């Protein structure tokens, strides 16, 4: 069993992957914003010698780094661009010190594909991001793919849809943010286009899928999601029914917001025979709202 270097181990996606690696008995080293307090399982990019030593064993590298959010490019475009470029270049400099057996790059399906072309987006569709965040995701994919080509490293890109259900990050992602606002009795600003929909995937199931992909490496791009889109208006409807006291304020969507985001997971299923399961976003939302005491 190969070792795993997990970049972004303490983040929303990375922490789910870390839990799955533990469940499967992997030896892994994580890279996060701060060192883990109990032991040295998670280090920072400043711990270069430790990371380079680990890389010499030709581990699988799973790159779940993603500190920036779409709004960061709106609030401070120059600052966000600088942070993005600095982080990517620093990570690439470290990876050049070793030669991993596989680079599994975690990307964002919805922001990379942009508006669905009248059908679920598949891996052959050209990226059409509407936001600068999405455009930088496309650039990020290309830079890591170029590195993999130059150093003869197998490159797999997993374009993940909208995860939900990470108990360690209960305020990340639309579904969990909705629940959090109800719990704190705070207004939720529903700002999306008419007919807007998203593909959601249960975070623990996402982690199982990504680790399974790392175990049976195949080159190329793969969509990772549930394969079905949920109208955002349906989420709001469930919220109104389950928590009639919830404060919902309608607003105007940003020009760069995608309306219809839908992806095909056929390639993932046919290549890996993986069928992501777990609760749907609606089932999860109903269950969590039923536990809210007012």
Image (tube, rainbow, N blue to C red):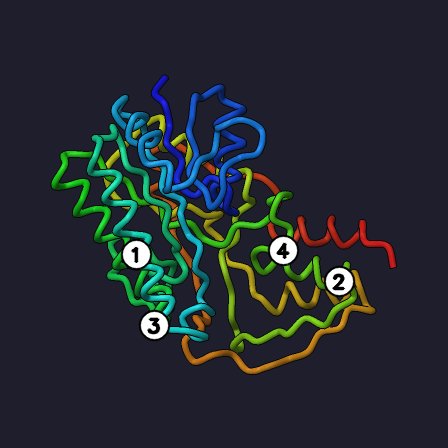
**Pointer 4 residue:** 171
- Residue 240: x and y, percent? 75, 68
What is the secondary structure assignment of the residue under circle 2? helix
Could you tell me if the residues under marks 2 and 1 are in contact, i.e. CB atoms within 8 Å?
A: no
Q: CA distance from mark 1 to mark 4?
A: 27 Å
**Pointer 3 residue:** 78
What residue is at 73 percent from the left and 50 percent from the top?
Answer: 288
Placement of 11 over or under 38, stated as above or below: below
- Residue 13: x and y, percent? 48, 45
Could you tell me if the residues under marks 3 and 4 are in contact, i.e. CB atoms within 8 Å?
A: no
**Pointer 1 residue:** 86
Which is nearer the eye, 52 or 283? Answer: 52
Placement of 53 over or under 193, stated as above or below: above
What residue is at 41 percent from the left and 76 percent from the top?
Answer: 256
What residue is at 41 percent from the left and 60 percent from the top?
Answer: 110
- Residue 128: x and y, percent? 29, 67
Q: Earlier in the sequence, mark 3 or mark 2?
A: 3
Q: Residues within 10 Å of mark 3 (few under 14, many from 20)?
A: few
- Residue 127: x and y, percent? 27, 62
């Amino acid at each position: 069993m190969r070792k795993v270097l997990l970049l972004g181990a303490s983040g929303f996606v990375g922490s789910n992957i870390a839990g799955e690696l533990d469940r499967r008995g992997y030896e892994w080293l994580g890279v996060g914003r701060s060192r883990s307090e109990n032991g040295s399982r998670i280090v920072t990019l400043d711990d270069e010698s430790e990371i380079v030593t680990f890389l010499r064993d030709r581990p699988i590298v799973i790159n779940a780094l993603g500190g920036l959010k779409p709004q960061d490019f709106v609030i401070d475009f120059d600052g966000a661009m600088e942070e993005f470029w600095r982080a990517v270049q620093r990570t690439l400099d470290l990876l050049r010190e070793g030669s991993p057996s596989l680079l599994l790059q975690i990307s964002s399906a919805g922001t990379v594909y942009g508006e669905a072309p009248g059908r679920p987006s598949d891996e052959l569709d050209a990226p059409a991001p509407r936001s600068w965040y999405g455009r930088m995701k496309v650039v990020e994919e290309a830079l890591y793919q170029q590195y993999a080509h130059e150093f003869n490293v197998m490159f797999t890109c997993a374009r993940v849809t909208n995860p939900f259900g990470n108990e360690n990050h209960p305020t990340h992602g639309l579904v969990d943010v909705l629940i959090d606002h109800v719990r704190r009795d705070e207004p939720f600003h529903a700002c999306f286009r008419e007919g807007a929909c998203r593909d959601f995937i249960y975070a623990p199931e996402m982690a199982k899928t990504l680790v399974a992909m790392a175990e049976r490496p195949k080159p190329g791009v793969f969509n990772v999601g549930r394969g079905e889109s949920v109208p955002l208006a349906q989420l709001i409807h469930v919220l109104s029914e389950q928590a009639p006291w919830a404060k919902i304020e309608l607003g105007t969507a940003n020009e760069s917001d995608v309306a219809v985001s839908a992806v095909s997971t056929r390639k993932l299923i046919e290549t890996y025979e993986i069928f992501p399961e777990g609760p749907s976003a609606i089932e999860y939302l109903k269950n969590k709202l039923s536990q809210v005491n007012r």
